Image (cartoon, helix red, strand yellow):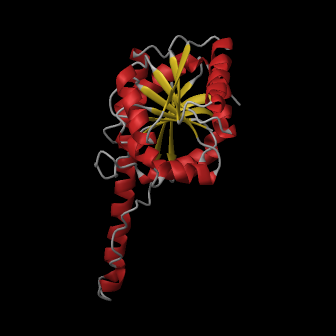
Amino acid sequence: MTEQVMAAIDGSQFSEGVCDYAAWASQALEAPLTFLHVVDNHPQTAEADLSGNIGLGSREHLLEELSQLDEQRAKVAQEQGRLMLKAAKERAIEGGVSDPATRQRNGTLVETLDELQDEIRLLVIGKRGETAHQAADHLGSNLERVVRTLHRPILMVPDGFKTPEQVMLAFDGSKTTRKGVEMLAKSPLFNGIPVHVVIVGAETGDNRSQLEWALTALREAGHEAEGAIRAGEVEETLRAYKEEKGIDLLVMGAYGHSRIRHLLVGSTTTAMLRRASVPLLLLR
């Protein structure tokens, strides 16, 4: 089955960014692009069950009306989804993608992506979904569940698109981040884009050796790469480097549930990622 760039869109403010980054990735990877919209017929905020409050004489009639209202809402949601998919396809074609596909499914986003993940080379998803709280440092709960479930690279994007010109890979020399370097080296996604490898820690012989390994792996694969070892607190140091070098895309490795849980819940690095206005690529 052909692996493709899959872009999950909804009615949120992030959908345009998802469309544009997905179109960019599709062309860079020379991979087919599919837009996915999932109609969730069981929203997180459940409506009250009124059936117990209906009098005996009118119970059957009102239950029938409630059922009809549910059907109407489902039809409206499906039609809205079709219109969104049509608009996304047109936007991608304008952006240079030759023949993007569209798919609409019923169910939940997480379950749908889990079923489709064998077809996914890269998932592009917004930082927050349509029903998420709008606080700038909030990651949508759907996104957290997707990251925990999916075993494919995930590109989390903001609401506006900017062609990446400087990429930063947070690196600590561990087995997981070395695997991330190897994956990045093989990928054409960042061809022609400088990759910055940053270790936060002391200037030791071991850190210098780890950094040289990463830079060599990237350069031998044809990537332009530079590196740095910076002492300091992780979040502040990475943020300062990002601002100094004009980094417009972050790359991190995420392998295994505990690693992902640490990434998304409570770590100092997470605070930076949640506030980031640039895309984050999670390599699995």
Q: Is residue 246 above or below residue 261?
A: above
Of residues 178 and 158, the one drawn nearer to the viewer in this rendering: 178
Of residues 208 and 145, the one drawn nearer to the viewer in this rendering: 208
Residue at position x 43%, y 54% from top? 141
Describe residue 116's horizontal placement relative to residue 91 as left or right.
Answer: right
Q: Is residue 165 above or below residue 75?
A: above
Q: Quadrant of residue 255?
A: top right
**Residue 202 appears in view:** yes
Question: Quadrant of the image for the N terminus?
Answer: top right
**Residue 230 coordinates in the image, percent (x, y):** 48, 30
Residue at position x 34%, y 68% from top? 47
**Residue 186 appears in view:** no
**Residue 44 coordinates in the image, percent (x, y):** 40, 61
Residue at position x 44%, y 38% from top? 232
Residue at position x 30%, y 45% from top? 136
Question: Quadrant of the image for the C terminus?
Answer: top right
